[in-house]
Image: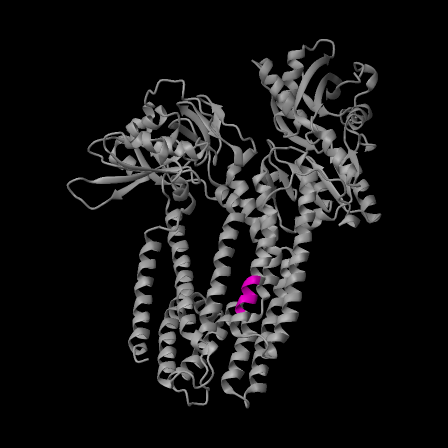
């Protein structure tokens, strides 16, 4: 977020705001207000990012309303938005924005997108259905109450008929309007030969209404004379209440994910050849296009700043919460917010190939995929629903000869009381809540099933480079063969290193570009190969001196005899460069152990998890790292195959292994572990084949992640347990006529709410230190 | 008790009128930001 830096500066209107003064610009965040054609008014919404307290909203409101031309200003602290009604004849948007700036706050236009308007309309409709049901329920209860307190014959039949008719009349809106969704869903299911929760509910509502209507208009008929409008309206109200709360809770749990997935606006201003701008759909953008991005908008694609400088918020992409300053020619990433001023960018990567696009894909995939427990619940739900309908028919048949009306109402109670939704909601509700907690902390999850897997692990294996150590590796010194300069050696190494994503390769390539040692020397490489965990090789063409096969990597990989080499410095890690003639150069690299690694390892050990370190580096570097962070069990100079063997050995011993790696050079090992975590920093996400990806590479989150997953599994078990207990108790009660229809409705509503609220406890990532998370302690 | 023959139908009519009022309130957005308006009471005093 932006910090408040404006108070000390004189309020010069930000020049980029004046572009908002044209009508087609301000229409994007405004709508007409009032209907006086002589004095047109406009209502605009503005984003206020740095509102800190409730008093701030008052300051902004008062500061704005004193301006001529501003009719009203309302600031909402919770939404961080101001709604301003103003007259285009008297004031311009840039004046409003600079007035807010003068007050010490930063504002930006909040473009209303259609999704938002849609969801408002939807939530209003749902609220209105619920309100109609609630109000009619109260009124119907009034008409029903005389029959609760009087004996038969106390009320004259005329009056009681009149009461029934009144109740019938007010049940109509509940039937026709409020319960509409139950009926339409049930109809949809029947049409597609499916069966879902809404079918028994709709049947129950329908039966109750028919029985009661018959009793109202034909009290002497064989349906009996008892009406159940009070029950009907009540359980519709309870069910709608439960659904309303469920939707609220659901949008709360998924809020972080939704915010991430739908943050890019649907259209963007693209610059035409003559320098003017046209709004085009994002799908029409191409690489090389120049687009203008306004304050508060998200960048539609990856690109380079070509006009202006700004601050951006990349928090949801990297977990980095402070605004980052971007100068001219800096790269900006899709999905980050432009906070500073309107800028132009030239697009370099668009659509799904941007990191943002990959994150969105991952999240969507994870949300679609059904975890094992959820599939199990779905399989159980179908036969369960058939069983319910069957028991309802049986219950009605048993009582049919006693009283037709009562028989049907018992069936209705059986239909309504069942709650398979508690069963089928139990797992996905909890797992999605968990996943959204992860997303908030910069942890992406590829498949929901991984939550169950990581909760049961007993061994953690770490890779070293890029995982326990910082991604940033520094080149300390270079030893070269006689006749070769350091710069040439580095240039040579960098030409081949630039084709690899390995942290060491990137460190060499970076060092070369910093020292500008590649100036004037160009090599043409062919047949570039990377042997994972060992090094790279390539053939050099068109260079007299170094032609032949060039190798960069570990001593073993370079096949160079150690005698010729410089002495290996204990403090550093060595990478060798060799060609057909033998050793060329040695690069001494230093990598720093992540500052929070020791703490994280310690927490894992306290939780009685076995911690191991497997690395391809030489013994002494690995030993140093292991000792400094407190890992006792380690293995150095591992080829990827060695790592796989070790993993298989552990698996044979019945261990459940969590593998933590950088996600790039250890793909097969990550894939064969029970569950895996990759560091997502600076790595293309599609290449990171792991169950979890830590976007900010912070390994201190791993103990918390494991703990949270275990809590999730606990809550899922509670939910499933509750659903089973509830149904086994309540269905027999309803079957034997001990539950009336309204009690059944209340029971079902409360039951599914319990499940959802229980799951909601998972949306907060608990940061409490923990002592024991071994599987036995659960 | 004959008055009930008027009062019961009247109560139905009144209920429908109240429903109309609620409809107006819902679609004017009266229930959308409940906390903010409550807090506003405490702020106006600074004038």
Residue A733 showing in the rendered view? yes
Query: Going by the picture, which residue comes out furthest to the left?
Result: A38
Left or right relative to A315: residue A636: right
Quarter of the image holding residue A379? bottom right
Q: Main secondary structure of the magenta part?
A: helix
In the image, residue A22 above or below residue A566? below
Query: Going by the picture, which residue comes out furthest to the front?
Result: B1
Say which of A221 and A193 sits in front: A221
How far across and down, in percent of the image, does residue A30 sit? 30, 40
In the image, residue A455 above or below residue A312? below
In the image, residue A518 above or below residue A210? above
Residue A262 covered by magenta stretch: no
Left or right relative to A152: residue A88: left
The stretch of residues the image draws in magenta is: A745-750
How far across and down, in percent of the image, does residue A728 sit? 66, 70
How far across and down, in percent of the image, does residue A172 sit? 37, 72
How far across and down, in percent of the image, does residue A539 sit? 66, 26
Residue at the image point whose x is 57% and y is 66% from the top: A747
């Amino acid at each position: 977020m932006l910090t408040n830096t404006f108070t000390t500066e004189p309020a010069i209107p930000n020049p980029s705001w004046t572009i908002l003064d044209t009508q087609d610009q301000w229409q994007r965040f405004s709508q007409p207000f009032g209907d006086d054609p002589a004095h047109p008014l406009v209502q605009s919404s503005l984003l206020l990012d740095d509102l800190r307290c409730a008093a701030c909203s008052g300051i902004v409101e008062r500061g704005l309303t004193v301006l001529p031309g501003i009719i009203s200003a309302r600031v909402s602290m919770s939404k961080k938005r101001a709604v301003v009604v103003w007259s285009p004849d008297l004031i311009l948007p840039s004046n409003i924005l600079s007035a807010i700036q003068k007050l010490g706050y930063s504002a930006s236009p909040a473009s209303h997108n259609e999704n938002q308007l849609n969801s408002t309309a939807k939530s209003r409709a749902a609220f209105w259905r619920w309100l109609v049901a609630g109000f009619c329920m109260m009124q119907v209860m009034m008409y029903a109450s005389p029959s609760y307190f009087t004996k038969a014959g106390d009320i004259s039949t005329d009056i009681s008929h009149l009461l029934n008719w009144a109740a019938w009349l007010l049940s109509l809106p509940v039937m026709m309007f409020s319960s509409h969704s139950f009926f339409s869903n049930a109809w949809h299911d029947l049409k597609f030969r499916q069966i879902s929760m809404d079918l028994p509910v709709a049947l129950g509502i329908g039966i109750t209404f028919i029985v009661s209507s018959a009793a109202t208009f034909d009290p002497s008929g064989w349906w009996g004379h008892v009406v159940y409008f009070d029950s009907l309206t009540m359980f519709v109200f309870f069910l709608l209440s439960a659904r309303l709360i469920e939707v609220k809770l659901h949008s709360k749990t998924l809020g972080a994910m939704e915010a991430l997935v739908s943050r890019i606006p649907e259209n963007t201003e693209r610059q035409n050849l003559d320098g003017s701008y046209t709004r085009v759909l994002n799908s029409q953008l191409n690489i090389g296009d120049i687009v203008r991005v306004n304050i508060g908008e998200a960048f539609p694609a990856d690109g380079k700043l070509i006009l202006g400088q700004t601050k951006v918020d990349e928090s949801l992409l990297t977990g980095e919460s402070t605004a980052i300053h971007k100068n001219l020619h800096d790269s900006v990433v899709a999905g980050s917010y432009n906070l500073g001023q309107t800028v132009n960018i030239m697009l370099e990567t668009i659509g799904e190939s941007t990191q943002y696009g990959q994150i969105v894909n991952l999240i969507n995939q994870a949300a679609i995929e059904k975890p094992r427990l959820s599939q199990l619940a779905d399989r159980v739900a179908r036969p369960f629903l058939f069983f319910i309908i069957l028991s309802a028919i049986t219950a009605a048949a048993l009582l049919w000869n006693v009283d037709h009306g009562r028989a049907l109402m018992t069936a209705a109670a059986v239909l309504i009381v069942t709650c398979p939704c508690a069963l089928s909601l139990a797992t996905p509700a909890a797992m999605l809540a968990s996943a959204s907690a992860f997303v908030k902390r910069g942890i992406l999850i590829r498949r929901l099933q991984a939550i169950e897997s990581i909760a049961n692990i007993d061994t953690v294996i770490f890779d070293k480079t890029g995982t326990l150590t910082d991604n940033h590796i520094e080149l300390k010194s270079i030893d070269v063969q006689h006749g070769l300069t350091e710069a040439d050696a580095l240039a040579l190494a960098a030409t081949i290193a630039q084709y690899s994503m390995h942290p060491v390769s990137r460190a060499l390539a970076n060092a070369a570009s910093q020292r500008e040692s590649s100036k004037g020397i160009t090599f043409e490489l062919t047949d570039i190969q990377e042997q994972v965990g060992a090094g790279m090789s390539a053939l050099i063409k068109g260079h007299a001196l170094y032609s032949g096969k060039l190798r960069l990597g570990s001593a073993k990989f370079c096949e160079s005899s150690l005698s010729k080499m410089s002495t290996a410095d204990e403090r550093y890690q060595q990478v060798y460069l060799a060609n057909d003639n033998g050793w060329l150069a040695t690069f001494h690299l230093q990598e720093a152990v992540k500052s929070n690694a020791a703490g994280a390892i310690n927490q894992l050990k306290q939780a009685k998890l076995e911690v191991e370190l497997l690395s391809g580096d030489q013994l002494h570097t690995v030993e140093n790292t292991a000792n400094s962070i407190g890992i006792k069990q380690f293995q150095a100079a591992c080829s990827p195959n060695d790592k796989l063997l070790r993993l298989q050995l552990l698996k044979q011993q019945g261990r459940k292994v969590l593998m933590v790696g950088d996600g790039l050079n250890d793909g097969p090992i990550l894939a064969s572990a029970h569950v895996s975590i990759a560091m997502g920093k600076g790595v293309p996400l599609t290449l990171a084949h792991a169950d979890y990806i830590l976007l900010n590479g912070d390994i201190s989150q791993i103990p918390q992640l494991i703990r949270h997953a275990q809590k999730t599994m606990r809550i899922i078990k509670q939910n499933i347990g509750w659903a089973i207990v509830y149904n086994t108790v309540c269905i027999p009660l309803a079957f034997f006529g001990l539950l009336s229809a309204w009690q059944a409705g209340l029971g079902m509503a409360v039951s599914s709410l319990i499940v959802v609220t229980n799951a909601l406890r998972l949306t907060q990532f608990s940061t409490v230190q923990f002592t024991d998370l071994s599987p036995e302690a659960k | 008790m004959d008055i009930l023959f008027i009062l019961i139908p009247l109560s139905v009519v009144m209920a429908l009128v109240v429903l109309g009022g609620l409809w107006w309130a819902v679609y004017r957005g009266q229930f959308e930001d409940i906390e903010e308006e409550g807090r506003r009471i405490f702020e106006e005093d600074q004038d």
